[in-house]
Amino acid sequence: MKTLKILSLALVSIALFLSCKNEENPSTKNIINSEDDIAIIDLITDDKNTEIDYLYVTSTSGLSLREYANLQSEKLAIMPYGSKVKIISSELKPTMKVEEISGGMDHIEFNHKKGFAFNGYLSKYFPPEKGISAKKYSGELLLAFPTVNYSETKTGTVSNPINTEKLTLPETQWHEAFYMAQQLFNIPKEFEFPASKGKDKEVILEKRFKEKNWTSELQITRKEGTLSKIKYKYKNKRYTKTVSIYKEGEMMVIDNIEDIK
């Protein structure tokens, strides 16, 4: 009888043990047991592949970061030339014009501050730093934009060398190319980006233009109310420099020709 009781107690103990083993552990019921589940969770929480857009300030005098999306709202900061800003959202449709440049107000982040800035002075191309050569600048651009193209040719003679540089940029607006050329090839700052509407042929002289054998002028060509070519020409007795900005298909071209006599 005693043996039977012991045997019964043993059987009950084994049954309880097996029951506990099969019971779901509350602390582990959310454990993922398949690669598919893991992949889904990674897709939701991993933001490493999230694309973040950045643009650069191209205005040499800096660009205002404003509290709201209008030019009259409070200035939160002045973003210096060349500043890299994070784009939160873009206003793609032009809603205003500033100094002959059409654009809108992008929602951006700069230096841990969020606000709005006129996107006519924002570009995907980082602007050239002061004193940099076109060749070096284009080399830096190529690292980020493989479709940018630069070429340099030397012709003429030893006594009369002619050097030609050509920079080709995809998806570039007229004003972006103008300010880039102004910085790279020393176009006087008093020449402002020209309006798209006006005379078919227009020449603007530099204010200090005085002598007959000295030229510094901006030549503007328009066709049907749009820009066709912007050309800067500088000339003295022994040197001629011509910087041209024009479209070649879908590409914007800046070329610089220097003729030394």
Image: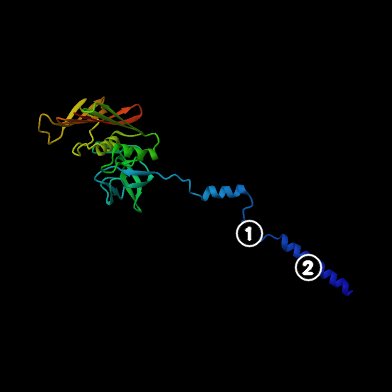
Q: Which residue is mark 1?
A: 28
Type of the residue with mark 2: Ser
Residue sitting at x 40%, y 44%: 53
Residue 187 percent across, percent down from the top left: 21, 36
In the image, is 4 to the left or to the right of 92? right
Check the picture and name the quadrant holding the N terminus: bottom right
Identify the element where label 1 is drawn: helix
Residue 101 percent across, percent down from the top left: 27, 37
The answer to whether one can see residue 124 in this image is: no
Quadrant in which residue 199 is drawn: top left
Residue 215 percent across, percent down from the top left: 15, 31
Q: Which residue is mark 2?
A: 13
Report, in whole angstroms, how far the alpha carbon at label 2 lies from the one at label 1. 25 Å
Residue 34 percent across, percent down from the top left: 63, 49
Identify the element where label 2 is drawn: helix
Residue sitting at x 75%, y 65%: 17
Type of the residue with mark 1: Thr
Front residue of this view, candidates 202 and 259: 259
Residue, far right: 1
Quadrant in which residue 124 is drawn: top left
Quadrant in which residue 232 is drawn: top left
Check the picture and name the quadrant holding the C terminus: top left
Crowd rating for badge 2 (residues with CA inside 10 Å; few <14, some 14–19, many 20+): few
Number of callouts in the render?
2
